């Protein structure tokens, strides 16, 4: 099966106040296309560091990271920006919507950065809003939406460039149990449509929606449990 991502002996060190903090001490992981991985672990285990490296938001100190066939650990900053814009979709706990923009305009934001706004692109953004259940909220601003609706808008925005995979950082962390179920159902649907999803969560109930649970501790891979095949 083709791999969406492969990391081998990935390491990340930070230098803080003259001390070396080893956030990742050598993590290896293969993620097949269409997989759905939940990353878990206590505070300080390296979850957020790993997600930042997978999202090309940071560079590893050592090891390799392949996104498809490309070794992104050795790419230039400009090339990494292109990778982030075209092949990775991000979903954050805090939604990161622009308050002055409407739902439709927020979904369009990644296209503005690439100068790709035209009538066809705008129609795709409307279709994505419909997909996540916001077809009747296109002109609403974030302050007029519930938390779940804001997260739906963020998910639609993450899909606008048809990314290779979606990285979700505590996507249900600010939501009540009912809305959490709705967002997880949406992520389940995207995964059934063969979107690869990597999600950081501290909640066991959320993690069980994934096909696989990877646990980190002290910057090392503690366990890798597969519940469902891709």
Image (cartoon, grey):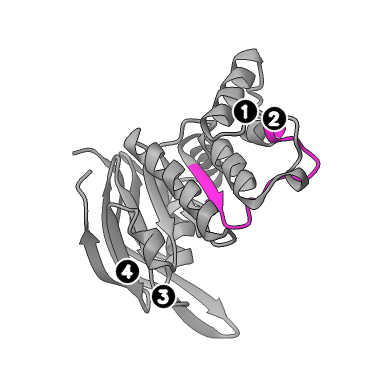
Closer to the N terminus: mark 2 or mark 4? 2
| Furthest-front residue in this view | 178
Label 1 – label 3 distance at C-alpha? 39 Å
Q: Which element is circle 4 on?
A: strand
Horizontal and vertical percent for residue 93? 58, 57
The stretch drawn in magenta includes residue 91 = yes
Closer to the N terminus: mark 4 or mark 3? 3
Q: Which residue is under mark 2?
A: 138
Residue 171 visible in the snapshot: no
| Furthest-right residue in this view | 100
- Callout 4 crowding tier (Cα within 10 Å): few <14, some 14–19, many ≥20: some
For residue 135, the mark is 1
Does residue 129 lie above or below 8 as drawn? above
- Callout 2 crowding tier (Cα within 10 Å): few <14, some 14–19, many ≥20: some
Residue 191, picture quadrant: top left
Q: Which residue is under mark 3?
A: 45
| Left or right, 169 with reference to 39 | right
Q: Which element is circle 3 on?
A: loop
Q: Residue at x 23, y 43 (%)?
A: 230
Q: Quadrant of the N terminus?
A: top left
Do the residues bearing badges 4 and 1 touch, measured as CB atoms within 8 Å? Answer: no
Label 2 – label 4 distance at C-alpha? 38 Å
- Callout 1 crowding tier (Cα within 10 Å): few <14, some 14–19, many ≥20: some
| 172 or 60: nearer the viewer | 172
Q: Which element is circle 1 on?
A: loop
Do the residues bearing badges 4 and 3 touch, measured as CB atoms within 8 Å? Answer: no
Label 4 – label 1 distance at C-alpha? 37 Å
Counting labels gives 4
Do the residues bearing badges 3 and 2 touch, measured as CB atoms within 8 Å? Answer: no
Q: Residue at x 54, y 31 (%)?
A: 160
């Amino acid at each position: 099966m083709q791999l969406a991502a492969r990391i081998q002996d990935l390491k990340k060190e930070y230098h803080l106040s003259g001390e070396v903090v080893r956030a990742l001490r050598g993590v290896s992981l293969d993620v097949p296309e269409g997989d759905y991985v939940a990353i878990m672990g206590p505070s300080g285990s390296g979850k957020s560091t790993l997600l930042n490296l997978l999202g090309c938001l940071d560079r590893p100190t050592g090891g390799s990271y392949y996104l498809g066939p490309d070794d992104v650990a050795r790419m230039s900053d400009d090339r990494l920006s292109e990778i982030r814009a075209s092949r990775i979709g991000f979903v954050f706990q805090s939604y990161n919507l622009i308050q002055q923009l409407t739902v439709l305009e927020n979904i369009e934001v990644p296209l503005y950065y690439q100068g790709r706004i035209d009538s066809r692109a705008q129609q795709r953004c409307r279709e994505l809003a419909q997909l996540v259940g916001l077809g009747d909220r296109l002109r609403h601003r974030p302050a007029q939406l519930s938390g779940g609706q804001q997260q739906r808008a963020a998910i639609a925005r993450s899909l606008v460039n048809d990314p290779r995979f979606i990285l979700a950082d505590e996507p249900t962390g600010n939501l009540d149990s009912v809305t959490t179920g709705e967002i997880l159902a949406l992520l389940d649907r995207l995964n059934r449509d063969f979107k690869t999803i990597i999600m950081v969560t501290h909640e066991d109930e959320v993690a069980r929606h994934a096909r696989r649970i990877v646990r980190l501790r002290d910057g090392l891979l503690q366990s890798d449990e597969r519940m469902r095949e891709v």
